[in-house]
Amino acid sequence: MNERRDALVQQHLQLARWAAWKRMRRLGPGHPLADFDQLLSAAMLGLLSAAERWDPERGAFSTYALPRIYGAMADQMRVETPGSRTGPSPVLVRLEKVQGMLCSRTDHVRRLETESEAAVVWRAAERCLTPAQLVALRGKYHRGLRGVDMAREQGVTESAISQLLSHALQRLRAELGVPTC
């Protein structure tokens, strides 16, 4: 068992390095949590955890390991967030992602700073989106699901989920008065 685990970890070290690099780039330069060594350390823990739990009958190891690697990095980032035992509100973190999706140009991005502002975004979403669009938006940004997982859950294609999200973000941009990117 340990030999198989060690072999998997050795074979997939680059996957953990790539995921840590990608997360660091996504956080951006100067972000207090964008420390490659810390992210890589957490990614390695996620890789090790995945190697211990992986069942070869469930598919490719890298497909199984990558969400665990990202999860371990997210857990580490929550722990390291100053002034909070549990890190920033999950609602704020996910809604910052929504805000970033609304307009990626930095001159138009307004960061969400309080939970009341986050609530404003969700109330706007509830006002202007169809129930299917709300389900897709909540699945992606509140529950953290991938498109393929939402598609399986809803019994539709991944393309349909992508279209729902795209239309939802367009409508939400219009509702909030965010300029089109």
Image (cartoon, rainbow, N blue to C red):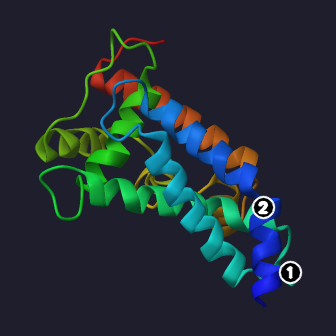
Residue drawn where x is 24% and y is 44% of the image: 123
Residue drawn where x is 45% and y is 12% of the image: 180
Report the amino acid beneath label 2: Ser
Task: Tell me the element at label 2.
Answer: helix
* Percent x, y of residue 3: 81, 83
Which residue bears the numbered disc 1? 56
- The circle on residue 62 is 2
Q: 129 or 37: nearer the eye?
A: 37
Q: CA distance from mark 2 to mark 1?
A: 11 Å
Which is more N-terminal, label 1 or label 2? 1
* Percent x, y of residue 98: 40, 37
Q: Does residue 138 appear to the left or right of 48 in the view shown?
A: left
Report the amino acid beneath label 1: Pro
Q: Quadrant of residue 56?
A: bottom right
In the picture, the quarter occupied by the N terminus is bottom right
User: Mark 1: few, some, or many residues within 10 Å (few <14, many ≥20)?
Assistant: few
Question: Is any atom of residue 139 visible in this view?
Answer: no
Q: Does residue 19 appear to the left or right of 135 in the view shown?
A: right
Residue farthest along the top direction in this orientation = 107
Task: Tell me the element at label 1.
Answer: helix
Tell me if label 2 and label 1 are in contact, CB under 8 Å: no
Q: 49 or 90: nearer the eye?
A: 49
Residue drawn where x is 29% and y is 25% of the image: 176
